[in-house]
Amino acid sequence: MTRLADRYELRRVLGRGGMGEVWAARDVREGRDVAVKTASGSAALDRLRREATVAASVDHPGVVGVHGTGRDGATSYLVMDLLPGPDLGRVLGGGPLPAGEAVRVTAAVADALAATHRAGVIHGDVKPANVVVVGDHVVLIDFGVAATAADDDGQVTFGTAPFMAPEQVVSGPLTPATDVYALGCLLTAAVTGRPPFVGELPTAVLHRHVRATPPRLADLVPGVPAELDELTARMLAKDPARRSGLDEVGDVLARVRRDAPLDRLRPRPLPAVVGSLEPDATQPALVMLEEGHRAA
């Protein structure tokens, strides 16, 4: 057992959530900067080892690299690449991205997700806070709630309310289409500054994912290319079988980037929303809306 302080110099907290903290740190043995996720509790080491195994199974430059796990007393830890710059969630706190950049980032995340799905992994928590943009490089992070083919029915009951697919809300089986829905929410947030469904209470947001028709991108951003509007609508379909696959997503986004005058687009002003749009912590679904499901 390696004492955490003997190997890693923890320098500053990068983020806190319901499953622990993430620190910027220095690996004093290897002489490199890393990110260290720490968590406490009897099941923490198993959970972090599982996250490390899942993330390491995906060989793609757009997926965060992992370097190992360990335990120091009651604290378990996971060591990952340290990515400079803020996550996309923090960036969007200052307003939407230029449309061309939003499409570029979404296309890069789609490519990383395609590799993730080829490895038999469903991320399950695609959201701006789990995307880091470093110049031209886009990296998908945090596989803490990812599902694999070995999981029972591919089910995960955790997620972040504004980016949860309807089947995720009602504890249905997760599929690659679940990540496509979340990516549609991310694309909407990147272009407009806000995901399709927001509200003061997470329960209200979850209900809208299951019951409400998402706004059309063309209604939020005047002049948006029809192909991009239609793609986003397909990504946000309630029925997973009707959503676009990631190959189609990548093809359409590449075509739109090449052919459309995206730099001229400006989203309509959005009304203020009271309360947080994206909870700090990944959380269990707060309400199960289909008959026979109980609140988590």
Image: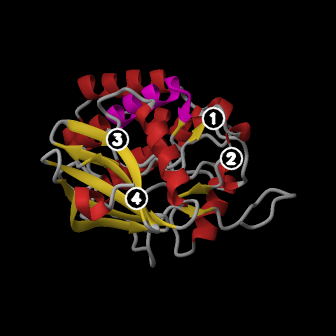
Cα–Cα span, label 2 and label 1: 9 Å
Residue picked out by circle 2: 167
The image quadrant of residue 262 is top left
Residue that protrudes farthest toward the left in the picture: 31
Numbered circle sitting on residue 194: 4
Q: In the shown orientation, is residue 283 left or right of residue 76? A: right
Among the two numbered marks 2 and 1 on one chain, the one whose residue lies closer to the N terminus: 2
Mark before the other along the chain sequence, 4 or 3 = 3
Residue type at numbered disc 1: Thr
Question: In the current view of this chain or complex, which residue is farthest to the right?
Answer: 292
Point out the tag, 1 or 3, that comes first from the N-terminus: 3
- The residue at which mark 1 appears reads as 175
Query: Picture coordinates of residue 133 (x, y %)?
Result: 24, 45
Task: Identify the residue at the far bottom of this view.
Answer: 274
Label 1 to label 4: alpha-carbon separation: 25 Å
- Residue bounds of the magenta highlight: 106-121
Camera-side residue of 19 and 269: 19
**Which quarter of the figure is the N terminus placed in?**
bottom left
Which residue type carries mark 2? Glu
For the stretch drawn in magenta, the main secondary structure is helix
Within 10 Å of disc 1 (Cα), the crowding (few <14, some 14-19, many 20+) is many
